[in-house]
Image (spheres, rainbow, N blue to C red):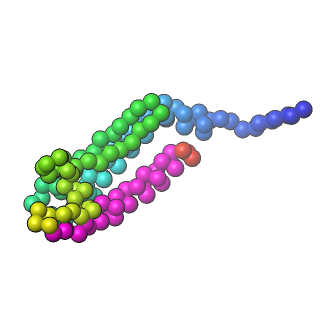
Amino acid sequence: MIKVSVSGSFQNTTSFLQRMKNQTYLKSLERFGAQGVSALKAATPVRGGDTAADWYYEIIQRPGYFSIQWLNRNTEEPGHIPVAVLIQYGHGTKNRGYVQGIDYINPAMRPIFEQIASDMWKEVTK
């Protein structure tokens, strides 16, 4: 026979589940989205300024899932190639040259990701 006994309360669990039900975490996602856009704008190498100015974010929410996506509207034709990606990873030129990429996205976003992880952990362990 197995006997289980429990002491204490489930108030922390109930409180956490209520916050998840009320979706209070979405306010944090808006804040992190804006912080990410600011960080990306500041870190984007500037030539014409279009790429730096065209950062934005979207919050994707589906049942049991949510995420923040940082996107950039500045594209190069043909094919709607994101200029931010060309800057990040490098690209060939029309005259068969090559422009070396500059890793500017990862260093700019690292502090944001660390803050998200820290804040979400605090939310879970309240």
- Residue 53 vertical position relative to residue 98 in the rendered view, above or below: above
- Residue 100 vertical position relative to residue 24 in the rendered view, above or below: below
Toward the viewer: 10 or 88?
88
Q: Who's the residue at 13% across and 48% down the image?
A: 78
Q: Who's the residue at 72% across and 38% down the image?
A: 8
The residues colored magenta run: 97-123
Total labels: the figure holds 0
Q: Is residue 40 left or right of residue 77?
A: right
Q: Who's the residue at 90% across and 32% down the image?
A: 1
Residue 25 falls inside the magenta stretch: no
Toward the viewer: 44 or 77?
77
Residue 102 falls inside the magenta stretch: yes
Q: Main secondary structure of the magenta part?
A: helix
Toward the viewer: 27 or 63?
63
Instruction: Report x, y in % for residue 64.
Output: 47, 33
Q: Is residue 81 left or right of residue 1?
A: left
Q: Who's the residue at 54% across and 33% down the image?
A: 17
Is residue 62 at all visible to an observer of this figure?
yes
Q: Quadrant of the C terminus?
A: top right
In this view, the residue farthest toward the front is 96
Instruction: Report x, y in % for residue 72.
Output: 22, 49
Instruction: Report x, y in % for residue 83.
Output: 19, 55
The answer to which quarter of the image holds residue 84 is bottom left
The answer to which quarter of the image holds residue 26 is top left
Is residue 42 at all visible to an observer of this figure?
no
Q: Is residue 119 left or right of residue 31?
A: right
